[in-house]
Image (cartoon, helix red, strand yellow):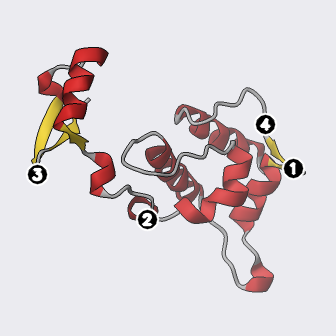
Amino acid sequence: MDYDLTTEILKYWNSKDIVVHRKLPKSNNTTLEGALKSLVNGQPKLGLEGYTTDEIKHAIDNYAEVINSDKYYWTYKWNLTEFLVRGFEKFYNDACLENYKKDDEEIYLTEDEVNEMIKNEGYKVADFKPVGGGKYECQK
């Protein structure tokens, strides 16, 4: 496996602040290099083509969006190798942004919740936007 690709993907992953690595992570007996090699080379015997560096980065972007936002119910954090082995297929296309989205009821706050956050957590009225039906969205 190309060391530059491994380093590039590791730096990109770390820039997303999901699970930051100081050294190359392993998942069971799979190394980061092995996981990347499998994704880049594909499985020709099964007719599966490999993925480009940009496609791998896009999957990381999607995962970071989901994991770092309250709009989604997915909260499990993998290390990079685990993500490439177990999570890549779940996040490589934008469908995941809809698939893991919470129902609107889970995202929006009631007026009581807003008042509690203003009173106890230092939020301001301007931090909330009414969305109708007595529900509010936090803009912060």
Q: Amino acid at mark 4?
A: Leu
The answer to which quarter of the image holds residue 104 is bottom left
Mark 1 vs mark 2, foreground winner is: 2
User: What is the C-alpha distance between the residues marked 1 and 2?
Assistant: 28 Å
- Marks 4 and 3 sit apart, C-alpha to C-alpha, by 49 Å
What residue is at 78 percent from the left and 30 percent from the top? 23
Q: Give percent across and percent down for residue 37.
A: 77, 59
Residue depicted at x 78% and y 36%: 24
Residue located beneath label 1 in the image: 28
Mark 1–mark 3 distance (CA, rounded to whole Å): 49 Å
Q: In front: mark 4 or mark 3?
A: 3
Amino acid tagged 1:
Asn
Q: Is residue 9 above or below residue 93?
A: above
Residue under pointer 4: 24
Q: Is residue 91 left or right of residue 119?
A: right
**Residue 76 percent location from the top left of the image:** 60, 46
* Sequence-earlier tag: 2 or 4: 4
Residue 78 visible at all:
yes
Real-space CA distance between mark 3 and mark 2, rounded to the nearest whole angstrom: 25 Å
